[in-house]
Each structure stands twice: as C-alpha cells, then as structure tokens.
Amino acid sequence: MELKLYNTLTRQKEIFNPLKAGEAGIYTCGPTVYHYAHIGNMRTYIAEDILVRALNHFRYKVKRVMNITDVGHLTSDSDTGEDKMEVGAKREGKSAWDVAKFYTEAFMKDYRSLNCLPADVLCPATEYIKEMIDLNLVLEKKGFAYRISDGIYFDTAKLPDYGKLAGKGHIEGIQEGARVEVNSEKRNPADFALWKFSSPEEHRQMEWDSPWGKGFPGWHLECSAMAMKHLGDTIDIHCGGEDHVAVHHTNEIAQSEGATGKPFADYWMHIRFLVTNDAGKMSKSSGEFLTLPLLAQKGFDPLAYRYFCFSAHYRKQLEFSWESVDSSQKSLEGLRAIVAKLKEEAGGQAAGKDERFQEFYRDFDNALADDLNVSQALAVLWGALRSPFGAAERLAFALEADKVLALDLDRAPVQEALAPELAALIKEREAARKAKDFKRSDELRKELSDKGVLIEDTPKGTTWKISRG
Ligand code: AMP
Ligand code: ZN
C-alpha cells in the first residue's frame, strides 16, 4: 500500500518514500512545559499518533523523537519577551525546574490517557545544551551567526532559499511585521536568536556558560540540535501544529540546512488548529483554555475527545463544542456496545475469509493511505459493523481497526449509574416476572420507559440502558 502524505514544503500530496526502505524517522515538536497542555495541543498529538500508528499498520519501523521545551521559548515569536518557563516560575512561586517537572508529568498523563504511543526518544531541551552549542559553533564557522548586544543571531540573508516552507510572501510578511519590532540591531528583520545572553537585571534561573557568554539557547536551535542528534542530518517526517510553519520550522530548516548543506526533513506535516466558537484559537499564554482533566470533570472519557478529533481531517480547522464531544462520547459508547455484543455472539469463533468482507479492510487501508483520512477510516468501521456479515468477522475487523484508532473498543461499555428509585423499580419488575405477574411487570416496564430507562429481557437476564431520545 502506498501511503500518501500532504507535504507543506511542496504543497501537495506525495507518496511517502523514506530514506531507508521500510523505516520512518519522525520528529514531533513537543510541549512547552510552563502550563498545562490544552485540548488544542492534544489535537496535534492525536494526529501525530495516527501518523505513527498508520505507519506501523503499513509495516514501517518507526523511530519517533519528541522534545520537551523546558527552556528558551519566549513569549514572542520574534525573540523578544520573557522565557515562558521563567513566566511560569513567577506565576507559581516555584523554581523554573520544578515548573518544568510538574507540567511535563501532567502532560504525559494527558498524553497517555489519549492512548498516544510513547515517543521512542523523549528529550528535554535542557539536557542537550552541549549539542546546541556545538551546532552554533558550526553555524558560526560557516558564517551564518553574528553577535549583537542581546545574543547571537542567524543571518537569514545568507541562505538563498530561507522561508521556502512558508512560501512566497513570507519574507515580505516578516518585513512588514518588523516595522513595529524593537530589535533594530538585527541585520535582517527575519533574523532570529541562536543564543541569548542573560541580562544582568533578569536573574534567570536557567542559564549556561557558552563560548559567547552566559545565556540560554534559542527555541528553534533546540529542535534542530535534538532532531539531528537522534535522527541524523535528514529526517523523514517533521510534524507540528500549523503555527510552526512561518517561524519555528522555517528557522529549524535554516539552521539545520545551513549547518549540513543537506535537506533537513523530506516531509513536513502540519496540523490545523482546534478553535473554540467564542474565543477563536486556544491560548496557553492567556491562561484561559480547556484541558483534558476539565473534560473528565464533566464526565467525558479522554477517548471521546480522541473520537471527536477524528471528525475532521487534520488539515481542516476543527471547532470545539460541548455538544460535539457529547455526541462523540455517545458514538464511542455505541461502538463499544456493538463490540461487546459481537464478542458474545462470536463466542470464540474464528473469523471467516469472505471475499466481500475483505473490501472493508481495503477501504480502511485506502482511507489511511490517503493522507491519513481517519474520518473516512472510522466511517468504514461503522459500515463494517452494521454489515450483515458474521459476528466473528466483524469483531476481528473492529479489533484490527482499533490498533490504529486506539479507542479501546473492547473495553466493556460503561454501565451508567442508576438513581436508587429506578434501580428499585427494576428489582420490583424482576420480582413480578418471577412471580409470573406479567401485568405488573409490563406496567413497571412502561413506568421505567417513561422515566428514560429501557428494559430488555435476554436469555441471560434483564438488562437496561438509558434512553438517549
Ligand atoms: P506548545 O506547547 O505551545 O509548544 O505547543 C505544542 C504543540 O501544540 C505544537 O505542535 C503546536 O503547534 C500545537 N498547538 C498549539 N495550539 C494548538 C491548537 N489550538 N490546535 C492544535 N494544535 C495546537
Ligand atoms: Zn520544535
């Protein structure tokens, strides 16, 4: 199966052709750990997880590297403002190191609850300062780096194709923006910091000695250094949210390609933002955002959020609403209930090899291979489950599909808590049935149904479910 991915660099879908046959090296920009991750961030990690799982499904051996940005990400993308970690430390009255530790753990908890596969290498930026300094030395030797009063900067005019990822008009946009910018010592408006000096007034908690003076690395330098350290000069796929195209990834390319003279990544995958209908995009820095624990407090399974993310292609903006997450939760519970039923019906039978049923497998693969069209893959699963084929066949397909969708479809559906008076009515009805008082039993069934509880008598006993109607 040929996997096609949309490549931001070439602005088209391309057949994935890795550097080494059968292997895929992936770098995904990780969280800036100065606050909780919001559900918008998690949309990006879910989409990246689908990429990894789809590659596994198509039998690629994946090596995925993800960083933890625990230093150097400034409050403004144009190298001004404070380090977000220091902002977090002031906000919470803790050390920047403790803030990083706390929010890294919180992030990993959310990440795992969404069934996102762990990265093969998880690298905190603060553990790679030496690699960053070494990369800077190469850039300096090659004439890309220059010094101004607040740090060492990259001279973007020295790289003829600077800005190729964001495309035409990108440099002009930065020049426009630069008119209001403060740092006038830079040679070109798009130039960016490789290493920033600690300023005497600032009293930074995180700083290191370097050949240029005490300070800290630029955010872009971190990802270039760690990606190349673990995946080599050229990597197969580099991912991140859409906001990274114009600045962060553009500058990663500049540093890495400036240093090695080789392409940095062959495929660039960018996930569009989750937005909220009232406030536009979610923003960590504003402090007002939705998190997975908040969704859980309202009774939502994190995997219902994962399911909700499958409702739009990763290259389309996705609008959050409580109603949509609620309906995703119901659909997910519906899927789990079908799988539970199929398990009972199949009762250990092996799946047959009906050629007509094999179409579902092909359609599922085709959907994934078409730039990870997971909404379509999910639609194929629903189609297969509703089809008239054998229970064992349908069950096997659901379990196979779930290796990619990772919705825990074989988890027993939740038995919702029932108000005690309703539970008492069910008990009374069971007693009436036992006593063969069918008139009373029917009255009680009607009463329960009027109160939204549907009763079903099966050979194994009486079951109930809450009516959604
Ligand atoms: P950060 O923790 O801010 O460094 O961001 C972590 C990841 O989340 C990056 O890949 C961002 O591009 C991505 N991201 C940030 N905001 C959103 C959003 N609203 N929707 C989807 N992805 C986002
Ligand atoms: Zn990055």
Image: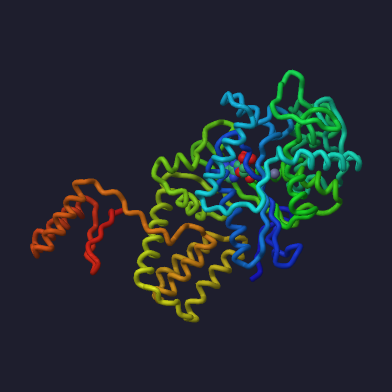
Answer with left or right where residue 404 lies relative to residue 321.
right
Location of residue 180 in the rendering, given as x and y in whole percent from the top left corner? 74, 27
Evaluate whether residue 247 shows in this view.
no
**How did the renderer colour the structure?**
rainbow
Image quarter for ligand 2 equals top right
Task: Give the residue drawn at x 68%, y 41%.
Answer: 124
Q: Nearer the viewer, residue 382 or 318?
A: 382
Task: Give the residue drawn at x 59%, y 49%.
Answer: 45
Answer with left or right where residue 65 lies relative to residue 209.
left
Give the tally of numbered discs.
0
Q: Nearer the viewer, residue 143 or 232?
A: 232
Evaluate whether residue 461 shows in this view.
yes
Location of residue 187 in the rendering, given as x and y in whole percent from the top left corner? 86, 32
Answer with left or right where residue 360 lies relative to residue 433.
right
Q: Nearer the viewer, residue 278 or 156?
A: 156
Location of residue 110 in the rendering, given as x and y in whole percent from the top left corner? 52, 45
Task: Give the residue drawn at x 41%, y 40%.
Answer: 297
Q: Is residue 459 above or below residue 450?
A: below
Q: Going by the picture, which residue comes out furthest to the top?
A: 201
Location of residue 352 in the rendering, given as x and y in whole percent from the top left corner? 45, 80
Q: Is residue 350 above or below residue 9?
A: below
Q: Is residue 69 above or below residue 357?
A: above
Which quadrant of the rendered structure holds the N terminus?
bottom right
Task: Give the residue drawn at x 12%, y 63%.
Answer: 434
Which quadrant of the rendered structure holds the C terminus?
bottom left
Q: Nearer the viewer, residue 196 or 327?
A: 196
